[in-house]
Image: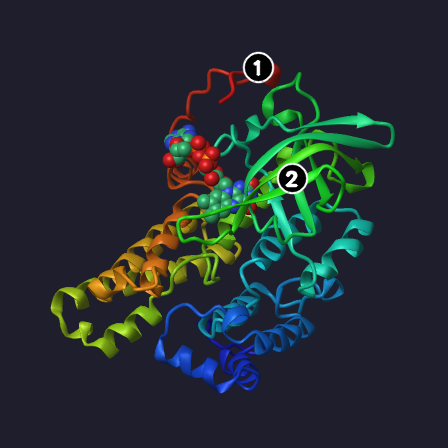
Amino acid sequence: MAAAREGGITAVAVEDWVRSRLPAQWLDAVAAGDGPIDPAVAYPEAARVFHAALCERGWAVPDWPREFGGAGLDHRDAATVAAVLARYRCDLPGPYFVSRTLIGPTIMQWGSAEQHERYLPGIAGGRDIWCQLFSEPGAGSDLASLSTRARRDGEGWVVHGQKVWSSFANLAGYGMLLARTDPDVPKHAGITCFLLDMSAPGVTVRPLRQLTGTEHFCEVFLDGVVVPDAARLGPAEEGWRVALSTLGAERSGLSGDSEAGGVALGPVLARARRSGAWREPGARDRLTDLLVLERALEWTNRRAGVAGAGMSGAAAGSITKLAQSELSQRIAELDFELAGPGAAYTETGELTPAAHGLLDSRRLTIAGGTSEIQRNIIAERVLGLDRELDPDRGQPWSRTRRG
Ligand SMILES: Cc1cc2nc3c(=O)[nH]c(=O)nc-3n(C[C@H](O)[C@H](O)[C@H](O)COP(=O)(O)OP(=O)(O)OC[C@H]3O[C@@H](n4cnc5c(N)ncnc54)[C@H](O)[C@@H]3O)c2cc1C
C-alpha cells in the first residue's frame, strides 16, 4: 500500500468510498477470504451500480487524463486506488482488462485527436470492450512473423487472415489488429496496426473452451474485411512499434494487483488461518515464503513505476511479469494442497474454487509472452547477453520460413 503523502490520495479515503458502495455480503466475503469473487456473477446488480460509480469518478482508469474519462492521478495515487480495488475485488471485471490496460494507452500514444475522442471515453466509461488481435496459429512468441494480410483498396484496406487466443473477442465491439501490409521487407518492417469494428462483414468469432471449462479466448477469422484508412493506428508499416507499446503495457498490467495479473496470497492466508492449516509448520513456512516474495514483488512493481528508480521500461515489465506469473502459480498450488483432497472432486463435476484457481493459473506463464520469452528479454536487455540467433534476420518476410 502506498504511503499517504501531502496532497496525495490516501488508501483510507479510497477504502471509505469503496466500502460505502459495496453490499454487506460482498464485504463479508472479502473479509473472510472467500474464493475469487466474480462480482458480475455473485452480485450482478450491485456490481453494475458500483462500476457505474467507479467509471463516473474516473477510477476505472485513474491515471488517464480527465479529458479522456480518467481521474488524472499520478502513478502513486493511481496505484493506491488500484490496490484498494484489488483488495475488495471490485475493479471492472476481466473483459475490460484488455481495453483499459493495453488498448487505451496505445491509442493515447499513437492515435490522432479524432481517434482519442472517438475511442477513449467508451473505454474509460466501461461501455466498450476491446480485444487484441495479435497472435496467430503460426505467430505467437515470434509475433512479427504474422501472416494476416491487409491490402490497399482505394481509400481503405481489405483484410484476410486468422487470429487466435483473442481474449474476450466474443464480447468485444472493437479489436486492435496487426496485419502485414508489405511482405517484401523484413518481418518487423511490413506490419500496420488497425482499429477494427468487430461487427464489420467478414469477421467471424469462435470461442475456444479452456482447461477450466470457461470460454475466455477465441479464434477470429477475417475474410475480406474492409477497414477504412481512418481506422489505421499510427503510420502504415510502423505497426511493430505500435505493437511494442501494447506489449509493454500488457507486461506491466499483468505484473500488478489486478485480477488479470495473478493470484493474491491474502485470501489463501485467511483460509489457512480459518481451517487450522496455518498451525502446521511446513505449511506456515511455505506461506511465509510466499508472503515475503509477494511483498518484494509489490515493492519492485512500485519501483518500476517510478521514473529514475533504476529499472528500465520494457525490461522492468518482463521482470515483474515473470515474477508475478510464477509466484501466482505457486500460490494457487499451495491453496489447492491446503484445501485437502475434497478440493479435487465434487459430486456435480463442477470445479471447486481451489481447483479452478489451480487450473486457471496455468495461463499466466503463457499469456502476454511466455516465461521463456521474458527470460530471453531479460538476458538480452538487462544482462547484455548475445541476441538469439535468427537465420532469417534481414530477409524479406516473403522469403522467411514460417511455422
Ligand atoms: C490466457 C491467454 C490469453 C491470451 N490472450 C491473447 C489475446 O488477447 N490476444 C493475442 O493476440 N494473444 C493472446 N494470447 C496468446 C499469447 O500471447 C501466446 O500464447 C504466447 O505469446 C505464446 O505464443 P504461442 O501460444 O503461439 O506459443 P509458441 O510461440 O508456439 O511457443 C511454444 C513454446 O515454445 C517456447 N518458445 C517459443 N519461442 C521461444 C524462444 N525463442 N526461446 C525459448 N522458448 C521459446 C514458448 O515459451 C512455449 O513454451 C493469450 C494466451 C493465453 C494463454
**Residue 33: x and y, percent?**
36, 75
Is 236 drawn above or below residue 307 in the view shown?
above
The answer to whether residue 305 is visible is: yes
- Which of these two is toward me, 74 or 229? 229
**Residue 398: x and y, percent?**
61, 15
**SS of the residue under disc 2:** helix
Dot 1 crowding, Cα within 10 Å, few <14, some 14–19, many 20+: few
Instruction: Give the residue number, with chain letter if any, for mark 1.
Output: 395
Q: Is residue 336 left or right of residue 367?
A: left
> Given the image, on which type of amino acid does mark 1 rest?
Gln
- Which of these two is toward me, 73 or 84? 84
Residue located farthest toward the top when viewing the structure as drawn: 399
> Given the image, on which type of amino acid does mark 2 rest?
Val
Instruction: Give the residue number, with chain letter if any, for mark 2.
Output: 242
What residue lies at 45% left-to-right and 70% top-to-bottom?
A: 37
Is 65 drawn above or below residue 22 in the view shown?
above
**SS of the residue under disc 1:** loop
> Which of the 4 image quarters holds residue 284?
bottom left
Cα gap from disc 2 to disc 1, whole angstroms: 22 Å
